[in-house]
Image: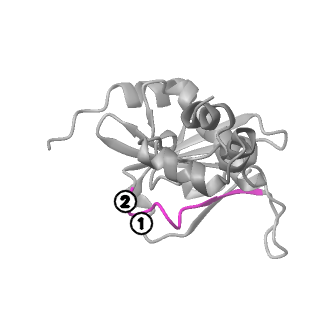
Amino acid sequence: MNYKEAYEKHKHLKNAADELGIPWQTLYVHLKKEGVPVCGDKSTYGSLKDKLAAHGEEIFKKIIPTAIDNNQSKFQAKVDFHVGSYAVDVKTATPRKPYPKYHSFSWSFSLRKQSMEADFFVFVALDSEKNESMFFLIPAEMVRGKQTISIPLSLKSKWKNFMIEKKDLKLFFSQLPVLAA
């Protein structure tokens, strides 16, 4: 088995290196020399937060199969997807227990890193069992400078206006105009 095959099998440097009987650092150097993107598999090896994010990204890929997944070619890509010439970042949340001063459960989406890079955000709101509940499509200009968006399950929020059905989300991305270069 060669370096690339071992890494593609495991999507994890240490596990692939162990199978090859070499240090992970050596494997990394060989993969970079061969031009193999080293990005890992956060759905398998990531933290709980990473696994939740990967789950939402998988849902988005099923809805928009033409989307280019930037995480396949780069570890922690600045935005998750490109749909045509548009940068789309997917955020995923399950209901969180309310803080003492709030009375309802909410979904909380962190935008810290991507608010200046994305053209659109797609929020995947899951139920407590991690099944699809709702989707929100938000132009990036609407959230620039914000670090977190919280949407109460009651939907008593301005963000309710950005709720979108799955079929309409698919239609929207299929009809985007091409941006001039």
Q: How many marks?
A: 2
Question: Taking 120 as reference, is 101 above or below it?
Answer: below
Task: Tell me what residue is drawn at x 37 percent, y 59 percent.
Answer: 141
Judging depth in this view, the residue of 96 and 153 nearest the camera is: 96
- Where is residue 151 drawn, in percent x and y? 65, 56
Q: Along the horizontal axis of the image, is 178 left or right of 9?
A: left
Judging depth in this view, the residue of 123 and 151 nearest the camera is: 123
Amino acid type, mark 2: Glu
Q: Which mark is residue 141?
A: 2
Numbered range of the magenta stretch: 106-117
Task: Tell me what residue is drawn at x 57 percent, y 25 percent.
Answer: 62
Task: Tell me what residue is drawn at x 44 percent, y 71 percent.
Answer: 145
Contact check, label 2 and label 1, Cβ < 8 Å: yes
Q: Is residue 52 visible?
A: no
**Which image quadrant: the N terminus?**
top right
Q: Along the horizontal axis of the image, is 176 left or right of 71?
A: left
**110 falls in the magenta region:** yes
- Where is residue 177 drawn, in percent x and y? 24, 33
Q: Along the horizontal axis of the image, is 125 left or right of 158?
A: right
**Residue linked to disc 1:** 144
Mark 2 surroundings: few (<14), some (14-19) or many (≥20) residues within 10 A:
few
Mark 1 surroundings: few (<14), some (14-19) or many (≥20) residues within 10 A:
some
**Direction left: furthest residue:** 181
**100 falls in the magenta region:** no
